[in-house]
Image (spheres, rainbow, N blue to C red):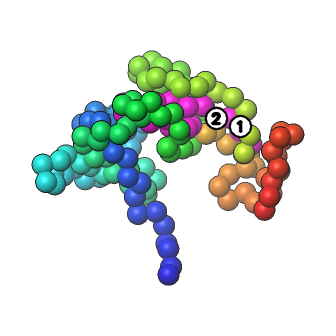
Amino acid sequence: MDVKAFSHIYLPSRSAEESIEFYTKILGFKLFRKYNMNGRLSAYVELGGVLLELTDGATNTPDQDGRTEPRIGLEVPDINAAIEELKAAGVEIARGPWAAMTFWGTQAMIKDPSGYIISLREWRAPDSPTYMDWKPEHDNVERLD
């Protein structure tokens, strides 16, 4: 089997319309396709060639059952500016910026309308998704590969 890339990431939403608005107007995703199937509104929003599928009417979103695990991570060029902009837009900041443990850079967390935690990441050069020589900067982190 030859897996080429992500097809999409499924994210059931409390309200597809509210989620479409958040991901497109606040985070800059592009609406790729919006559809109704079996009476349920759904949409694909796109960022960097990856589709996020938002489906209406989920009954098990974090805001409904109290979960707090991060679901997706997004890269930003300036995490402090991003946090200020998101605060001004009324987005809930789940955790302000801190020195990341598993990459060189800074991390923060926000919540989407359904309560999903979104991790924001600002890389510090030369680290990146293609940088192979990363070494931990924290005593309690050990690189295994």
Q: CA distance from mark 1 to mark 2?
A: 6 Å
Write the start and end of the magenta stretch as one range: 103-120
User: Would you say the residues marked 1 and 2 are in contact, meaning their CB atoms lie under 8 Å apart?
Assistant: yes
Residue 16 found in image quarter: top left
Number of residues whose C-alpha sits closer than 10 Å to that of mark 1, classed few (under 14), some (14–19) or many (20 or more): some
Q: Amino acid at mark 1?
A: Ala
- Numbered tag placed on residue 107 in the rendering: 2
The answer to whether residue 44 is magenta is: no
Q: Position of residue 58 (x, y in %)?
A: 29, 41
Position in image of residue 9 (x %, y %): 41, 54
Mark drawn on residue 11: none
Q: Secondary structure at mark 1?
A: loop
Residue drawn at x 64%, y 38% as measured from the top left: 122
Relative height, residue 49 to residue 27 (above, below): below
Secondary structure character of the magenta stretch overall? strand
Instruction: Report the residue marked by disc 1.
Output: 100
In reply to whether residue 117 is colored magenta, the answer given is yes
